[in-house]
Every structure is written in C-alpha cells, then in structure tokens.
Image: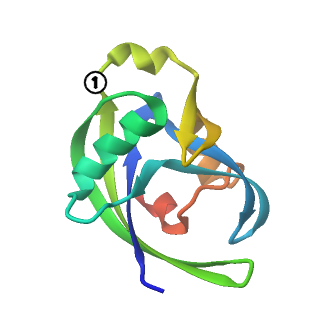
C-alpha cells in the first residue's frame, strides 16, 4: 500500500483551533478525537488547491491560505492495519470573517456527517483533547 498524500488547514480563533470531532477507533484506542479540516490530495492538484476545495466541500466556506507550516509524515496502526500519511499543513483564515462567530460547523465528508468546533489549544497541549496526526501538536 502506498502512502496517502493529505493536507490540513489550521484555522485559529482566540487560542482555539477549528477541528473536526470524530468518534471511533484510532491509533490510541477508541473514542473521541480531533483533526483539522482537510483531505486527500488528488492527482495533479496542488496541496493548497486541495485545502481550499476541502473547506468548500466539507463546511461550505472559502479560505485564504496565510502560510505553509510544515510537512508531517504519520505512520500509524488501527485494527492491525498500518496507515501512512504524508501531510502538508497550512495556516488559513476564513474569507468571510463573520464565520468566526459560529461555534460549530456541520462537516460533510464522504457521505458522513460530523461537526467541527473551536477547541482550546490549551486543552490539546494538556492532553485533555486528542489531536491527530500525532506530530501536529508540535507545530502548535
């Protein structure tokens, strides 16, 4: 199996990150965990283009990319299956500034519906909220 190329966007408001809340099995067990909005980079698509597309598809909003942050390589295991992601990370902002007043966003991804919400960076750093990919916490 080949590594999956992905992109994630860090949108920050008042020392909180906009993160999708997911529930299920993950590399540390099972339960609630968080991940920034993003997705799989398609063939011949630049990662920055993917990120803009994913924000429109998943929460119906446009973003501006502020800067490139880093590339993370994440190798993990869930249910005895090895996953391998190479992830481009960007800092982004909403084009529509009024969206910063919204507390939760409906996320539509692959026929599934979840929510994204503002999660305190302090809670993440203190280990109260589980953030993936693992090495993303080092970039905050």
Which of 41/26 is in front? 41
Assess disc 1: are there few (<14), some (14-19) or many (≥20) residues with their C-alpha within 10 Å of its C-alpha.
Answer: few
How many numbered discs, if any? 1
> Residue, x 24% and y 41% (percent of image)?
65
Seen in the image, is 15 located left or right of residue 67? right
> Looking at the image, can residue 140 be seen?
no
Disc 1 on helix, strand or loop? loop
Residue named by callout 1: 95
Residue 120 location (% of width, % of height): 58, 37
> Residue, x 47% and y 38% (percent of image)?
58
Residue 22 location (% of width, % of height): 67, 48
Residue 29 location (% of width, % of height): 78, 68
> Looking at the image, can residue 56 be seen?
yes
Say if 138 sits above or below 11 in the image: below
Q: Residue furthest front?
A: 111
Which of 12/102 is in front? 102
Which of 100/48 is in front? 48
Q: Quadrant of residue 46?
A: bottom left
Residue 38 location (% of width, % of height): 42, 50
Say if 17 sits above or below 129 in the image: above
> Residue, x 74% and y 78% (percent of image)?
79
Q: Quadrant of residue 68?
A: bottom left
> Residue, x 41% and y 58% (percent of image)?
139
Say if 117 sits above or below 53 in the image: above
Seen in the image, is 21 located left or right of residue 53? right
């Amino acid at each position: 199996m080949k590594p999956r190329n992905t992109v994630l966007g860090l949108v920050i408001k008042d020392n909180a990150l906009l993160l999708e809340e997911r529930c299920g099995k993950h590399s540390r067990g099972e339960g609630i965990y968080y991940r920034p909005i993003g997705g799989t980079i398609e063939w011949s698509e630049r990662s920055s283009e993917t990120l803009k597309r994913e924000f429109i598809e998943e929460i119906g909003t446009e973003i501006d990319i502020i800067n490139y942050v880093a590339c993370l390589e994440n190798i993990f295991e869930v249910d005895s299956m090895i996953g391998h992601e190479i992830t481009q990370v960007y800092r982004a902002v909403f084009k529509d500034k009024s969206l910063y007043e919204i507390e939760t966003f409906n996320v539509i991804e692959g026929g599934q519906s979840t929510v994204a919400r503002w999660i305190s960076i302090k809670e993440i750093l203190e280990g109260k909220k589980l953030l993936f990919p693992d090495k993303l916490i080092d970039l905050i």
